Amino acid sequence: MSATDGQGRLLAVVVSYACHNTTLRGNFKQIHGDWAGCARDFIEADNTGAVAMIALGCGADSDPCRTGPSNYAASTAGPWPTR
């Protein structure tokens, strides 16, 4: 969902993605916004003056990191996206 001004410039955007904020794992001992904070930063940097809100959708056990013994998702997924 987004809001624009009369000239079509982005003012605000709400992004919802079903994935836990757990990419940094337990050994990362600093304050950080994880993937949602990075997504917000990128959106706001690309749209000067806009405000971005990231909502963690209905993720349940959706983990952004490819882990586990069978790891079917890692063997079938493409490469991680880059900016």
Image (cartoon, rainbow, N blue to C red):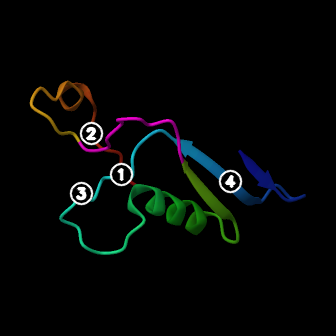
Examine the residues drawn in magenta and state their main secondary structure: loop
Residue 22: give x, y in percent of width and height: 32, 52
The region drawn magenta spans: 56-65
Question: Is residue 62 left or right of 1 when viewed as pictured?
Answer: left
Q: Secondary structure at mark 3?
A: loop
- How many angstroms separate mark 4 from mark 1 (CA)? 21 Å
Precedes in sequence: disc 1 or disc 3:
3
Question: Is residue 83 toward the left or the right of residue 78 in the image?
Answer: right
Under circle 1, the secondary element is loop
The reply to whether callout 3 and callout 2 are in contact (CB within 8 Å) is no
Mark 2 Cα shell of 10 Å, populated few (<14), some (14-19), many (≥20): few
Q: Earlier in the sequence, mark 2 or mark 4?
A: 4
Identity of the residue drawn at 77% across and 59% down: 9
What number is the disc on residue 82? 1
Q: Image point 22% across, 60% down: which residue?
A: 26
50 in relation to 65, above or below: below
Q: Residue beneath label 2, please?
A: 79
Please name the amino acid that badge 4 sits on.
Answer: Val
Check the image and report above or below for 35 versus 59.
below
Q: Position of residue 10 (x, y in %)?
A: 74, 58
Residue lying at the far left of the rendered structure: 69
Residue 79 or residue 60, whichever sits in front: 60
Q: CA distance from mark 2 to mark 4?
A: 27 Å
Please state, as top left, top right, bottom left or bottom right, where the N terminus lies in the image: top right
Give the numbered dot on residue 13: 4
From the image, state whether disc 3 or disc 2 is nearer to you: 3
Classed neighbour count for the residue bearing mark 3: other residues with Cα under 10 Å, few (<14), some (14–19), many (≥20): few
- The residue tagged with tag 2: helix, strand or loop? loop
